[in-house]
Amino acid sequence: MSFIRPEARENLLRWREAAIGTIIIALGLYWLSTTFGFVRILSVAVVAFGAVFMWSGIQRARFRGGHGGLGVVQVDEREITYLAPIGGGFASLDALTQVEIGPDRAGLPVWRFRSPGEMLIIPTSAEGTDGLFEALSALNGIDMQAAIRASTGKPEKPVVIWQKPVQRLH
């Protein structure tokens, strides 16, 4: 028997990294206010580490979404695989030319991974889309804030999250 409702438990798990970062910050601030010498200097580093951990946790919690949607997303070795009854496929991070979030025919947000001659479309509500956070952070210049905003709402038009830089020949 659980004393926590499933929705509340899911929400707590979603924000767990941010909560751990907050606890680390509180511990560091406690040490900073009650100790002297080397431990006090060390506590400043603990507070800084906690702040970074909390910021990362907030970003991940805002990015998470995939529950109840069609299909499953798996990320392995710089390759995104979407398993679905209709429209599944894969995309290599090395071959991508553009990543965007836009509306599908029903107006719900979907990921669009463009490669030369191919496009992989994944609903933002697909199971496992939280794995895209680490995969996409490997792309230089990606706008994660735009990805978070576009994936949590209903975009009216496509939002480009990342585009491969054009290499000019001299």
Image: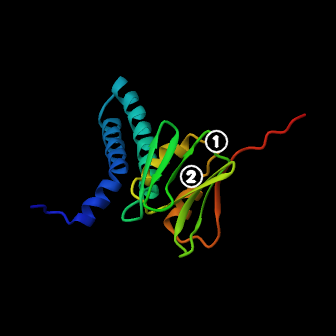
Residue 30 locus on image (x, y percent):
31, 40
Check disc 1 and report the residue beneath it: 95
Q: Give SS at disc 1.
A: loop
Q: Give SS at disc 2.
A: helix
Q: Amino acid at mark 2?
A: Met
Query: Relative to 113, is 86 above or below?
Result: below
**Which one is closest to the eye, mark 1 or mark 2?**
1
Disc 1 and disc 2 in contact, CB within 8 angstroms: no
In this rendering, position of residue 45 left or right of residue 168: left
Residue 101 locus on image (x, y percent):
59, 61
Task: Mark yes or no: residue 58 visible.
Answer: no
The first of marks 1 and 2 along the sequence is 1
Query: In this view, which residue lies farthest toward the bottom?
Result: 106
Task: Please give the label number shown on residue 142.
Answer: none
Q: CA–CA distance between discs 1 and 2?
A: 20 Å
Residue 113 locus on image (x, y percent):
60, 53
Residue at 30% x, 31% y is 35
Give the image's coloring scheme.
rainbow
In this rendering, position of residue 127 left or right of residue 168: left
Q: Residues within 10 Å of mark 1 (few under 14, many from 20)?
A: few
Query: Relative to 47, is 65 above or below?
Result: below
Q: Amino acid at mark 1?
A: Ala
User: For this rendering, which residue is in front, 38 or 155?
Assistant: 155
Residue at 39% x, 41% y is 50
In this rendering, position of residue 165 left or right of residue 40: right
Query: In this view, which residue lies farthest toward the left?
Result: 1
Residue at 33% x, 41% y is 24
Check disc 2 and report the residue beneath it: 144
Query: Relative to 60, is 2 above or below?
Result: below
Residue at 74% x, 44% y is 165
Query: In this view, which residue lies farthest toward the right?
Result: 170
Task: Mark yes or no: residue 160 visible.
Answer: yes
